[in-house]
Amino acid sequence: MATKIKIGADELILWLRKNNKAKNVTNQTLGLKILNLIEKDLMIGTKIIDDQKSLWGNSFDDEKGLGLPKTAAQYEIDSSMLKELYGTLNKW
C-alpha cells in the first residue's frame, strides 16, 4: 500500500523556480496548472486545503528574488507517484 503525503503547490513552484522552469509564468497560472496536473492529468491526488500560508514568508522571497507565492493549495498525493510528478514538472 502506497503512503499518502501532503505537498503544497508552493513547494512545487519553488522547485520550478529553482530549476529555471516556467519562467515568466505567474504563480496563479502555475497553481492552476499544478491543480490540473495532480487531479486531472496524472490523477495522483486531491486538493485538501485552499490558500494555506506559505512557510518561507516575505524575507525568503525577497532575498532570492524567486517571486514565490504567499499562499498556496495543499494536496494529498500517493508518494509512489513523486517521480512521475517531478518528471512532468521538469518538462515545463
Image (cartoon, rainbow, N blue to C red):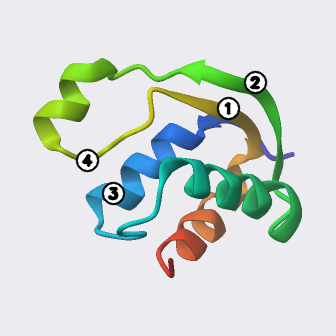
Kind of residue indicated by mark 4? Leu
Residue at mark 2: 49
Mark sitting earlier along the chain (4/2): 2
Mark sitting earlier along the chain (3/2): 3
The picture places residue 61, in percent across and down from the top left corner, at 25, 33
Residue at mark 1: 74
Residue at mark 4: 66
In this rendered view, identify the residue nearer to me: 84 or 64: 64
Label 2's element? strand
Is any atom of residue 4 visible in this view? no
In this rendered view, identify the residue nearer to me: 70 or 16: 70
Label 1's element? strand
Residue at image position (82%, 48%) is: 45
Labels 3 & 2 near each other (Cβ < 8 A): no
The picture places residue 15, in percent across and down from the top left corner, at 39, 54
Residue at mark 3: 17
The picture places residue 6, in percent across and down from the top left corner, at 66, 32
